[in-house]
Image: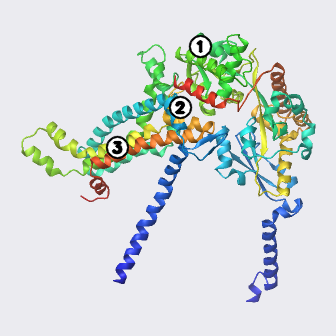
Amino acid sequence: MLLTRHGRVLRLLVLGLPLLAIAVSIIGPLAITLIVSFWQKKGFGMVPAFTLDSYLLFFEGVRLEVLQRSLWVAVSATVIMLLLAYPIAYLVTRRVRAEFTRVFLFLFAVPFLVNYIVRTFAWADILGRTGPVNSLLIWSGLVTGPVDWLLFSDFAVYLGLVTAYMPFMIFPIWLSLSGLDRRHLEASWMLGESPLATFWRITLPLSLPGVLAAAIFGFVGAFGEVAVSLILGGTGYQLLGNAITSALNVLNYPLAAAISSVATMIMLTLIVAWYRLFDIHLFLGKIMGRR
Amino acid sequence: MQDHMFFSRRQILAGGAALGLGAALNLQGRMISPAFAAGRTLTLADIGVGDTGDWTKFEQPTGNKVSVVSMGNGPSAVVNQLVAGGGRSIFDIINIVGGMQKPLVDNDLVLKLDPSRMPNWAKNTYIKDYLGKGTPGFNFIGYEDTIYGVPTILQGDSFAYLPEETGELDSYAALFDPKFRGYVSLEDNYTTAGQKTALFLKKAGQADIKDPANMTPEEVKTVIDFLIEQKKAGQFRVIWSSFEQAVNLLTSKEVHVMDCWEPMVFVARSKGHNAKYAAPKEGYLLWALAAYIVNNPERSEAEIGDTYALLDFMLGPWYGAKIALLRGYMTNPGAVEYAKAHPDEFSAEEATRVAEIIDGVKHKFEQGGTWQNRWPTHVDVYEEEWQRFKTA
């Protein structure tokens, strides 16, 4: 009886302390940001208040365009990344022998060994007018002069986002696919379904929790991106992260907090949707090695 | 056993007492004389241009050490580091581009200065010549008739170009010349790019702007409308935001004309590229780097004295010569003479170079232009309008 009580206390401590730490370190700053977003900017500081001024400034000014662009770029980049990440994860799951799977997955993690700002600057060198890509195109006779749209363009921003976040998306999709019960696939085959129909009706639906998790990783990364748009975007390519930095530059903390809060709400909505649509325990169970 | 002991009990007790006294003195450091205060470390937060890399000339005679830490130059970066980043208790001096006394003083982040505590202040004729009260330059070191900053560097900015691609250029008009369409870059900063554009529009008679350094909301809108028009015509290749990015744009010939700082041209040249810094007929964007004493209420009078000593050293001729040579900026009037008189520390070529650099910047100030305004009256309008330009 005593042991059970001690066990409960121990369990409460072991689980409770990390949860408390998470609450303080993650939820705390988010709550403070939300509160500050309603405060009044006064001089170089702010005073506690409940005003929607910062939200009005955000939604009535040019920053609304930045929000719309950020949403569009993040959604479209996520779709592109999914279209690339899914086939890669599928091939690693189905076509790569089990003993080589870790090697392949490690290869996709290699880019993360280089700082991502450095990687982004490297793209600027590679895609520039005098960079290797343009030099090769000119040397091969495919073009007569440098191709300007390779750098400081939408193309460059999407390339930067895809190379930065797509590798993150392979892992949850691979987890979903590798956790599929093969008996479902065999049953489909025995019932006469073609491989394509099996994919559409069995594999894809069952891998959707991983796909949505991957989509969230990609979307959140792309939506909050600052460096890629700054380095590869050209003439003031503004995403939401840049707008927050810009507000901070004039010490407008309530505005920066309001933009951050809107971004957080959008991302939170996605996570809640994922939680409501899919069985998160099933997905986490796979990560933890349980079926 | 006793023979093998390094210290007797008496020695240990005496040592313990000494340590205790030392600790007590350290804790009570604010109460002791300046002589006892020697041996502390002064922390200088710098934006990357004020570090000589060698502070022994200050450290040896004073017994104090100098620790240089990096800090951002943006107004928010400075204020944030002082308010929220613990900077008030960590930094003794911040060495940043001057002109943002208003947020620093209004937030009680820096101390007002007593120039009489710095012997080199009176010797620095540049302060009177370029930064005197009642002149636009005063805004870089003072606020409401009170001095807060020590001017460590003076400079006039214009733009860089690659003469082999563009020919010789002598006007900001080059930034907007259709001949260079798609090969121009601006800095992501309305107090530099925006103000240079305003200076150009005013001098070219293309806009009615009374003071490019402190524009009315309507004037800011006029400048931004012009920039948006240029942007939509494809004039600008990119808006740069970091030193390395700007240097790369020049060295890779991605752009041929660039609104930037002179040290970027120095770096490009050191890499073998023929880049030039323009002498525009419209004048320069003039500015000064200022060192401020951070307002730390815990700091003792003795510690403030040590901080003044470091500020005075930064106004001194050795520091001035070294920084001029390293960064290409004008520093103080004693720098040239010191470099010439100390061949053991500065070679003849280096002394000549220091003189050339300082003469070059003096010439810029003689030509004039507009003083950069880091915190214009309608700063929020500047910010909103700059957002409009970038988003367009």
Q: Kindly identify the residue that appears in the image at 46 percent across and 32 percent down.
A: A67
Give how far across and how far down residue B364 sits, in percent: 80, 22
User: What residue occupies the far bottom of the structure in this picture?
Assistant: B1
In this view, the residue in front, B392 or A257, is A257
The residue closer to the viewer here, B171 or B255, is B171
Q: Chain of mark 2?
A: A
Vertical placement of B58 versus B122: above or below? below
The span from disc 3 to disc 2 (Cα, nearest Å) is: 25 Å
| Chain at numbered mark 1 | B
Horizontally, residue B36 falls left or right of residue B91, namely: right
User: What amino acid type is highlighted by mark number 2?
Assistant: Ile
| Left or right: residue B316 compared with residue A88 | right
Secondary structure under tag 3 reads: helix
The furthest residue to the front: A50
Task: Please tell me whether mark 1 sits on a helix, a strand or a loop.
Answer: helix
Q: Is residue A19 left or right of residue B347?
A: left
